[in-house]
Amino acid sequence: MKTIQGVLWDNDGVLVDTEQLFYESNRDLLLPYGIDLTPKQFFDWFLDNNYGAWHVLLGQGHDIALVDRLRLERKRLFADRLRQARRLALPGVQQVLAALRPHVAMGVVTSAYEQHFEISHATTGLRGHFDFVLTREMYLESKPAPDGYLLGLQRLGLDAAHCVAVEDSPRGLRAANAAGLECIVLRNQMNRHHAFDGAFCVVESMAELGEVLASFVPGMAVEQRQLEAFL
């Protein structure tokens, strides 16, 4: 089994339970235009292909000015939902990060905007586990392009061969792979139907994720036993 020196984490659906809120924000915004966005469409359009539902609006004859206005409205709507939510950190993630922190460098590579990231982590207590956070404004092309992960590796000062990524979306997996990273995919309600070909492995729970990460890190046995008591 390989050993690692760094872990790059996605945010939404991996650290915090926010993807349902983002889905609801898009659904509510599009419904007045006759688009009843389903969870399957959300996954295929937003989390797999990275083109949202704007193509449907444009296909209906709406102009790009409307799309631009709705993008801004979505940012506001999503921010409001995040502020109203409670306990956004995924159960067990605090313990996994705490067990890893003494042994590896860690960063966040997210497609979330800085505003949304900051709101979602206002009370999670997770920020201190990371050496840096890269939000959408900080790199050129969004996932599935590798830009964010390449910058993350640069910030870590490590080769991809000595790191892994943790993701929950097909476009995130493709971004990690394109940067040369092996990627662990965490299952959730949104992605349960997807095969995730190309992943190093697919884990069904935070406890299983902790076990896989611990297998990469020499000297983490004590922390792993402590972790299992919480998960």
Image (cartoon, helix red, strand yellow):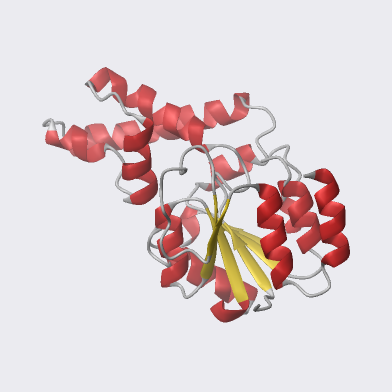
Where 104 sits versus 54, above or below? below
Q: Residue at x 50, y 30 (%)?
A: 21
Q: Quadrant of the C terminus?
A: top right
Q: Quadrant of the N terminus?
A: bottom right
22 displayed left or right of 28: right
Q: Residue furthest top?
A: 32
65 displayed left or right of 23: left
Q: Residue at x 55, y 44 (%)?
A: 13
Q: Is residue 131 visible?
A: no
In this figure, what is the number of numbered marks?
Answer: 0
The picture places residue 62, in percent across and down from the top left corner, at 15, 31
The picture places residue 44, in percent across and down from the top left corner, at 33, 44
Dividing the picture into quarters, in which one does residue 82 lie?
top right
Q: Is residue 154 visible?
A: yes
153 displayed left or right of 74: right
97 displayed left or right of 1: right
Work out whether residue 191 or residue 9 is closer to the camera in this orientation and state it.
Answer: 191
Q: Residue at x 55, y 40 (%)?
A: 116
Where 114 sits versus 202, above or below? above
Work out whether residue 38 or residue 21 is closer to the camera in this orientation and state it.
Answer: 38
The picture places residue 38, in percent across and down from the top left corner, at 34, 29
Q: Residue at x 79, y 70 (%)?
A: 103
The picture places residue 215, in percent across and down from the top left corner, at 71, 69
